Amino acid sequence: MEELKQNFLKKLKERIQNCTINSKKLREDECYDEAKLEIIKINIYEIFQTLFSATQKKVLQMKAGNPNLDERECFTKEYLLTFDKIPKNWADNYQKAKEREMVEVYYVEEVKLATAKEIKELFLSCIE
């Protein structure tokens, strides 16, 4: 479990650092909208980083009540549920923005959803 945590969080941290660098370069080039999208990606990475820790605490509490619990299996199941719960509002906002032709909102929600999907795929690759 510790190896999964270190590996996954390291990869998230690398992505956060890359987005920070990209955002800075884009601002220097006066590409403010693109820089804003990089900041949004950072926020999504940080949300799922926080959810990783929260899920870990939840599973440890569950294991305290049930010592036979398979911690890694339970953690994987619980953490994957966050990828259904959290992006649901983003998907709803994405659809509404698309219907109303709210281009900026549409792209923001699209970036959030794509980043969440990327994080989920990253997590799945770490548990294999």
Image: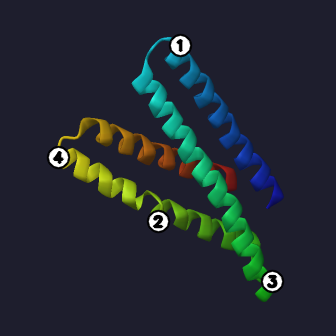
- Local packing at callout 4 (Cα closer than 10 Å; few below 14, some 14-19, many 20+) is few
For image coordinates 42% across by 40% down, the residue present is 111
1 and 3 marks in contact (CB < 8 Å): no
Which residue corresponds to mark 4? 100
Which residue corresponds to mark 1? 28
2 and 4 marks in contact (CB < 8 Å): no
Q: Where is residue 51 in the image (x, y as percent from the top left)?
A: 63, 60
Which of the labelled discs sits on residue 63, or is there none? none
Nearest to the observer: residue 57 or residue 11: 57
Give the mark nearer the N terminus: 3 vs 4: 3
Give the mark nearer the N terminus: 1 vs 4: 1
The answer to which image quadrant residue 103 occupies is top left
- Local packing at callout 2 (Cα closer than 10 Å; few below 14, some 14-19, many 20+) is few
Give the mark nearer the N terminus: 2 vs 1: 1
Classify mark 4: helix, strand or loop: loop
Give the residue type at disc 3: Ala
Give the residue type at disc 1: Glu
Which residue corresponds to mark 3? 64
